[in-house]
Image: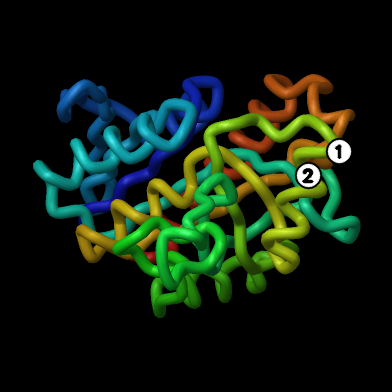
Amino acid sequence: MKIAIIVPMEIEAKYYRKYFHAGNKEMFGSSVFEHFCVKHNDIYIGLSGIGKVQAAMNLASLLTKVDIDLIFMTGTAGSLQSSIRKGDLLLADSFSYHDAHNTLAGNYVEGQIPGEPALFDLKSKEQAAFADFLQEQGIQYKKGLIVTGDSFIGSNEQKKKINQDFTSALGVEMEGAAFAQVAYHFQKKLIAIRAISDNGDDSANEDFDKFAQKVGAKAAKIICAYIEKMN
């Protein structure tokens, strides 16, 4: 099985090297991926970069060259609900773009790109199996819609507008919908988990790098344990 693990930043990627050893570096497009062989599985670990274009470009570069079976995407997100707090784990069952406003261009809903689905649905048997694993391990998570845009959400005004347009959205981040769109067109299964780093409001600038490292280590532990269990 060929598995891709994509994270936004190197401070998150480094934790996977504790579990996977003797990897080779391979270039796909402008992206460097580390390639590990683990129990007859090929694991490709790379950086998405920050933002939608970087995420789409780097994932597409890999998928045009390697017939990946399953993609894991990890990282952080801001909370859009009062019940979701810093440190909570989100499992995305769908993605949309909070910065796509095309309702005046035709029969489109808020967040929809013309010619694309209204939502990018991630529900699959692979995601269900991963959710079962989280429950078996006693790892609490919330599942639902996450929205994506190219701006860091760090003000109450920004958050209020997104809440108005996407009342059910759990979190907001900068790459997920682009990943989901690429996976949709390549017909690949995507499992996306995000840890809440902030409230998506005026307090959203506190110790981000330190938190990203902490949740990066946790995500690596979870995903690597799951890959071990898959065999």
Q: Is residue 140 left or right of residue 98?
A: right
Amino acid carrying mark 2 in the image: Lys
Residue 82 % position (x, y)? 90, 56
The secondary structure type at the circle numbered 1 is helix
Q: Residue at x 61, y 57 (%)?
A: 146
Amino acid carrying mark 1 in the image: Asn
- Residue 182 appears in the rendering: yes
Placement of 30 over or under 97, stated as above or below: above
Q: Residue at x 38, y 65 (%)?
A: 230
Q: Is residue 205 left or right of residue 153?
A: right
Residue closest to the eye, 105 or 133: 105
Residue closest to the eye, 84 or 117: 117
Q: Residue at x 56, y 53 (%)?
A: 193
* Inter-mark Cα distance, 2 to 1: 5 Å
Residue 32 % position (x, y)? 25, 23
State if disc 1 and disc 2 touch (CB < 8 Å).
yes
The secondary structure type at the circle numbered 2 is helix
Identify the residue position indicated by label 2 in the image: 159
Question: Toward which corner of the image does residue 137 lie, by quadrant?
Answer: bottom right
Other-residue count near label 2 (Cα within 10 Å), few / some / many at <14 / 14–19 / ≥20: many
Residue 66 % position (x, y)? 13, 46
Q: Residue at x 49, y 77 (%)?
A: 128
Identify the residue position indicated by label 1 in the image: 156
Quarter holding the C terminus is: bottom left
Placement of 122 over or under 70, stated as above or below: below
Quarter holding the N terminus is: bottom left
Residue closest to the eye, 151 or 165: 165
Residue 192 % position (x, y)? 50, 55
Q: Is residue 68 left or right of residue 4?
A: left
